[in-house]
Image: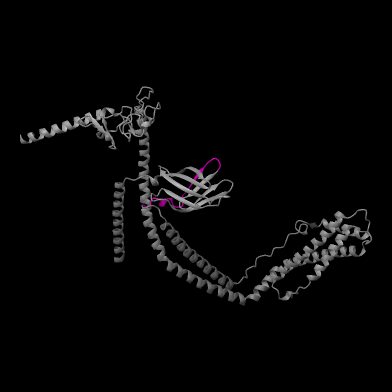
Amino acid sequence: MKTHSVSLPILATLALSVAVARANVENTPRGVSPSSANLYVPDRANNWSCLDGSKTIPFSAVNDDYCDCSDGSDEPGTSACGTGNYYCANIGHTPSSIKTSRVNDGICDEECCDGSDEYDGQTHCPNVCDEVGAKAREEYERVQSIQNEGARLRRGFIKYGKANKISLNKELENLRDQVDEVKEALADAKDKLDVANAAQDAYLEGSKNEREAARKLQLEPIIQDQTKRLNYAIEIRDMLKHTLQNLKENHNKNYHDLAVKGTVSGFNDYIVAQNEDKAETAQDEAILSSDRQFDGLVDETSLVLRDIGTLYDLLEGMKRDYNTEYNDEAVLAAIKVTDDFEVTWDLSKQDFVDVEPLVIPEEQPVDNPEAEKFKETTDLAQDAFNDAAEKESKVQDGIRDIERKLSMDLGHDETFAQFVDNCFDYKDTEYTYSICLFGDANQRSHSNTHLGKFSGWEGDNYDTQMYTGGTKCWNGPERSVKLVMTCGTTTEIVSVTEPEKCEYLFKLQTPAVCPVPEGEEQEQEGEEQEQEVKEDEEDKEHTHKHDEL
């Protein structure tokens, strides 16, 4: 009974409070939000004070379409003051507020989907809150679905990133343990190669005479052919020189044909140059190797062919430009020689027609088992050195690559680890834009334009990257890119714009920036820590068993 006697007053008080509250809400002036309803309650004398305390007015003066308060608080539901906020309940959608200056202005405001802001009857604003609310809830559910799926994918990114970092550190440790070993192996292989090369060089020096004799026998036919070619070229050169010398001495000097005079003058210049070039040192062919002897013949033939080309150009120029009515016997004789020679001369190759240069063959190996043994040993040593050098280079390159990746800021939870060096393209009507995350950004059309290189994150949210130092614009700055990321279920560039000259804005949607509920993230970290402890214990157990064995 005692308990019941105490509870009745409490229940009565609660019931009275609820009734008063309901009455207050029902009596709340138009345009006042429920959260501010308690500010619009009259005192016992049915008066009310402006919210800034500047004046007390009858409560009936609230919303009387006359501005009494300096702060406009007495007209929350009219446009009389125009400085306050009008509350739209928007039942079926989301409550909102507009400036009181927009109340009964004849415009249906989107913020008041219930049409309550146009209550004077001058403008009919239908209540569309159910329809708008349904669309808003549908859009919310769509966005929520994307965020949920994005969060699920991001958790996978985080898991991969953290596991990848552990894996990279283990791989780095393993590679660093190999450095001394591969360097020692490379040095050992180098020593063995040096020994093998030295032994082969010593043998080759000892068998030099034998090899040179074999090479001489091999090259003898081709040397003979090149000698014939040289002698024929010399014969033709001398014939052309004799023709020009005859022209110079015997043409009619009283008839001033410019073409003839030009040819004679050019021949004189040629003779002067030939005399200057004769300061050459003759070499005794007996002391030359067969290879050098052949090369010398080829070089000498080339010089003679060059002379032939020069002499022919002089004669051909005269033939083309001389006065055909000039019947000088020396000139006509030179024209006849030119006609006979030109059918045998290939002007494009500056060589005789249908003549191909002789190619010196590879040296034939001496049929000597000892020589083959030295060669085989040297080849094996070279292969071993190449393998050791490749392994050493692979270890060093691997260390540098892992250190580069570990030094990257991939987000506080390693979310972006799997995006390192991944590239994405976006094509518009004129250009194809590409960006390799943490790498370079480019613009491609007929040519490639560098837009910038990754220079860091902007802000602390890990959703904006900067790429700077691109190709300088004509009469402008260096090109740069701001990459802004938004939540999405796939990773792709959705737009590229140029807000400022040569400053590009890339928008990328990706699960990597979708929010993960804090509780789930902490739970995941706990699971990962437990897994790491378990793996460490397994590694220790495996090591212990290995040691026992």
Is residue 238 at all visible to an observer of this figure? Answer: no
Q: Position of residue 78 (x, y in %)?
A: 34, 29
Report the front residue among 79 and 265. 79
Please name the colour scheme applied to the rendered image.
Answer: one colour
Is residue 197 at all visible to an observer of this figure? Answer: yes
- Which residue of the protein is positioned furthest toward the top in this rendering? 121
Quarter of the image that includes the C terminus:
bottom left
**Does the magenta-highlighted stretch encompass residue 422?**
yes
Figure check: 318 above or below 31:
below
Report the front residue among 38 and 359. 38
The answer to whether residue 182 is left or right of residue 208 is left
- Which residue of the protein is positioned furthest toward the left in this rendering? 1
> Picture quarter containing residue 90?
top left
Figure check: 34 above or below 481:
above
Report the front residue among 94 and 160. 94
Query: How many marks can you see?
Result: 0
Figure check: 466 above or below 143:
below
Q: Where is residue 246 in the image (x, y as percent from the top left)?
A: 90, 64
Q: Position of residue 125 (x, y in %)?
A: 37, 25
Figure check: 504 above or below 186:
above
Report the front residue among 153 and 453. 453
- Which residue of the protein is positioned furthest toward the bottom in this rendering? 206
Residue drawn where x is 76% and y is 56% of the image: 348
Quarter of the image that includes the N terminus:
top left
**Does the magenta-highlighted stretch encompass residue 494?**
no
The answer to whether residue 161 is left or right of residue 359 is left
> Picture quarter containing residue 140?
top left
Q: Give the range drawn in magenta.
A: 413-430
Residue drawn where x is 43% and y is 59% of the image: 402
